[in-house]
Amino acid sequence: MKPTGNDKSLSFILAFQQGEESGFALFFRTHYAALTLFAFKITGQKEAAEEIAGDAFLTAWQNGLIFPIPQCSNPSSILL
């Protein structure tokens, strides 16, 4: 059975939760643009939006990404 997109998300989220940089890197690459766009829609400023998104990922990395796996259908939502 080939892993679905959600299975792939869960695997890199689990790696991220276990402190693996590769999991964080994939999580960042996958969700940075969407989070930046979301912040831009609120601030109207590209630089501020990029800083907000970067700060959210930095906080997630420093504090550990902790959320229940069954609620991972939309991993971006945990950063907001």
Image (cartoon, rainbow, N blue to C red):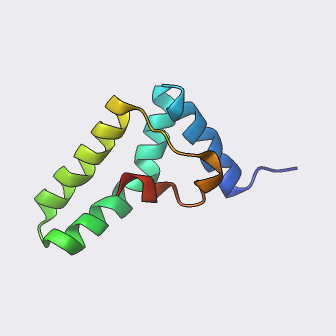
Is residue 1 shown left or right of residue 39?
Answer: right
Residue 80: image location, x then y, percent: 34, 58
Q: Is residue 45 above or below residue 66?
A: below
Q: How many marks?
A: 0
At 15% from the left and 64% from the top, the residue drawn is: 46
What residue lies at 11% left-to-right and 67% top-to-bottom? 45
In which quadrant of the rendered view does residue 11 lie? Answer: top right
> Which residue appears at 50% of the width and 34% of the height?
16
Above or below, 28 relative to 73 = above
Q: In the image, is 47 to the left or to the right of 68?
A: left
Q: Residue furthest front?
A: 68
Which quadrant of the figure has residue 48? Answer: bottom left
Q: Position of residue 61 (x, y in %)?
A: 36, 33
Image position, residue 49 (x, y; %): 19, 60
Residue drawn at point x = 50 percent, y = 25 percent:
20
Q: Is residue 38 left or right of residue 11?
A: left
**Is 61 above or below relative to 10?**
above
Task: From this view, report whether residue 35 is shown above or below residue 42.
Answer: above
Location of residue 25 in the rendering, given as x and y in whole percent from the top left corner: 44, 37
